[in-house]
Amino acid sequence: MPKIVGIDLGTTNSLVATVDSGIPYVIADADGQRLCPSVVHFPAAGAAPVVGLAANRVRVLHPATTAYSVKRFMGRRGADIPREDMLLTYPVRGDGAGPVTIPIHGRDFTPEEISAEVLKKLKFAAEADLGEHVTRAVITVPAYFNDAQRNATKRAGELAGFTVERIINEPTAAALAYGLDRLKEHSKIAVYDLGGGTFDLSILELNAGVFQVLATHGNTRLGGDDLDKRLVDFLAKRIKASGGPELTWPLLARLREAAEAAKIRLSTETETEISLPFLTPDFSFSHRVTRDELERLMRDLIEQTRAHCLRALADAKLEARQLDQVILVGGQTRMPLVRRLVSEWFGCAEFEEERGSLRLGDSFHERSGPLLNTSQNPDEAVALGAAIQAAILSGEFKNLLLLDVTPLSLGLETFGGLMNVIIPRNSTIPVKAGEVFTTAVDHQREMLIHVLQGERERAADNWSLGQFAVQFERAPRGVPRVGVQFEIDANGILHVLARDLKTGAQHVVEMKSAVDVADAEVQRMVEESVEHAFEDLTARRWIEAKLKAQEVLTAAQSGLTECGAELDAAARSQVELAVTELQAALATESPATKTGDVARLKAAHTALDTATQPLADLLMDKAMEAILRQRGVVS
Ligand code: ADP
Ligand code: MG
């Protein structure tokens, strides 16, 4: 099976990743670079384009023939793009309904064609790393991309020689890379993505193992580049103040490069030196910047993302504390201030702790904020997630990802023909769970362990995986105790253990694979359970009410036999009336639906409970007397 790679085709940087022996990793190019700037330079008409870091370096020297940030134009009509967004250092053409083109050396390039050059470079790096032809890819796009934008991305992949197996959402890919598909069903997560030129906040919900985008908001013109510009402006002022030269294009470019590098250093250091020796032959510049200063310069830009977070939450009709996790994506989220602010806005647990002991006392217990998960590399998460998706598609990850949850609930048939779930659907494997059962009938000699799989309330509507009997000594009902344990091992095999808790005798039975069920069948079972939810619930309520009613009925009848004669006539006829009514209520069960009048049954049950109170007191007195007599207290 040919390999499928995962690609993050970013506005600023692009990456290609793959999975080897279950481990996802980003592929480095021949120079050891894992991030490929999404920049393409065309040296001359017909000449091979220069891509990535090399193109980024010549960008300032050849601004008109070096294209970058073309992702903004993918699949968009010229008319839909604000004029100012088209003002870049290279020409962008596009008006009306036609697509945007980029004329360079007399040729009109489409954004897809330029992206294809970036993709070709990634393809080349992947082939060198894997030692085989690579022709299949999963490519990511922002969650807000429309059909036209997704199709343009697919076309770019095809132009680069890929079969695009799937286009997936960036936040979804990031969540996969963080392993969040293993969170509990209906978990909600926020993906905060601050890249080089764009900001997105997406809210996802995990539904049946699939991430659903509940809301997405953002700013396509806000990112790390804007933060860099703040530092550039600040430094430019300093240069001017110290009698420096007029900042021409190439000088400005050097300044920008130094500013970005300093910003990046200040994510790990608290102070750094920015030095630009020989800016002109007789002027060198150097300046120390602290992290505090940097934060003051950039803070308001980062704060602009807050409104988008709030709007996305409002669209998803959620409050921050209802989120399970917040994950960070995009190189710019490595900045400590970004982490601090995001943590604060979403009320993340980590941040509360940082505030120290003062608030701990009262806020500790009510602290219900999401977890700020920073366990992955923010600039690699999207590519890694795409690679994981690719591995799932090619079947390579089956054992690790698809089989690591139980697709359907596993349980036992209990008295009355109901399904008793022991391991719920979507539990992560390996997993072990158990319960203790007893008998419902006197003098039962054995108990049938009937193992079921499915989501329906009635045993008969689920699939039977197998059955066996556990023998024990005769005893009144409720006395024998049988512990049943279900264990699904890492291979998805279900081992059922049943032990007589009195003697310790036990059976272990291996059932067939509990997780290797065809997707279509799982879906059908889940759909049926939803479809029949109402009747299933009615059936369960009836069966449970019936079992309880039969129990009190038996008790009342044996109580009457035992000491009915000692009861006064009025009380006795009360009990007899209630018994008759309960029997009548039980008789409402229709043979067709196997359900009856639950309300009437419950009312009759309550009435019998009340009516038997004097009888119960009498029985209790007698029992006490018997005990006391046994101990010789009364004779
Ligand atoms: P995109 O998704 O737009 O392609 P990335 O996720 O690669 O972009 O993010 C690129 C941005 O992240 C750049 O502005 C870069 O300066 C910034 N960045 C990268 N590393 C760091 C860091 N350690 N600290 C702060 N910013 C960083
Ligand atoms: Mg990105």
Image (tube, rainbow, N blue to C red):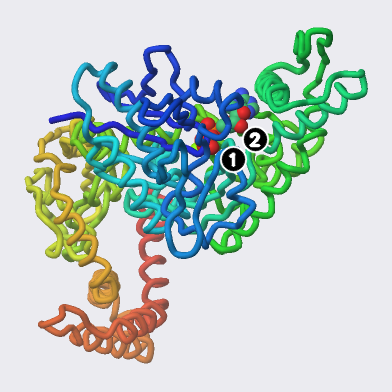
Q: Which mark is residue 225?
A: 2
Residue at coordinates 92% horizontally, 23% vertically from top-left? 241
The image quarter in which residue 348 lies: top right
- Residue in front for this viewpoint, 455 or 102: 102
Measuring from the top left, give residue 558's x and y in whole percent: 23, 72
Which residue is found at the position 19% from the left and 24% from the top? 133
Dot 2 surroundings within 10 Å: few (below 14), some, or many (20 or more)?
A: some
Residue 444 lies in quadrant: bottom left
- Tag 1: residue type? Gly
Viewer-nearest residue: 568 or 553: 553
* In-image side of 429 versus 352 (left or right): left
User: Where is residue 220 shown, x and y percent of the image?
Assistant: 58, 49
Looking at the rendered structure, the secondary structure element under dot 1 is loop
- Residue 109: numbered disc: none
Q: Secondary structure at mark 2?
A: helix
Residue plotted at (68% across, 20% down): 254
Instruction: Identify the residue under disc 1.
Output: 197
Q: Decide: marks 1, 2 in contact (CB < 8 A)? A: yes
The relative height of residue 276 versus residue 211 in the rendered view (above or below) is above
Q: Nearer the viewer, residue 347 or 612?
A: 347
- Left or right, 102 with respect to 446, comes to right
Q: Decide if ligand 1 comes within 8 Å of the CB at mark 1.
A: yes
Number of numbered labels in the structure image: 2
Distance from disc 1 to disc 2, alpha carbons, whole Å, reads 6 Å
Residue 267 vertical position relative to residue 306 in the rendered view, above or below: above
- Whichever of labels 1 and 2 marks the residue nearer the N terminus, that label is 1
Q: Mark 2 near ligand 1 (CB under 8 Å)?
A: yes
Give the position of the C terminus as an image quadrant. bottom left
- Image position of 50 with respect to 635: above or below: above
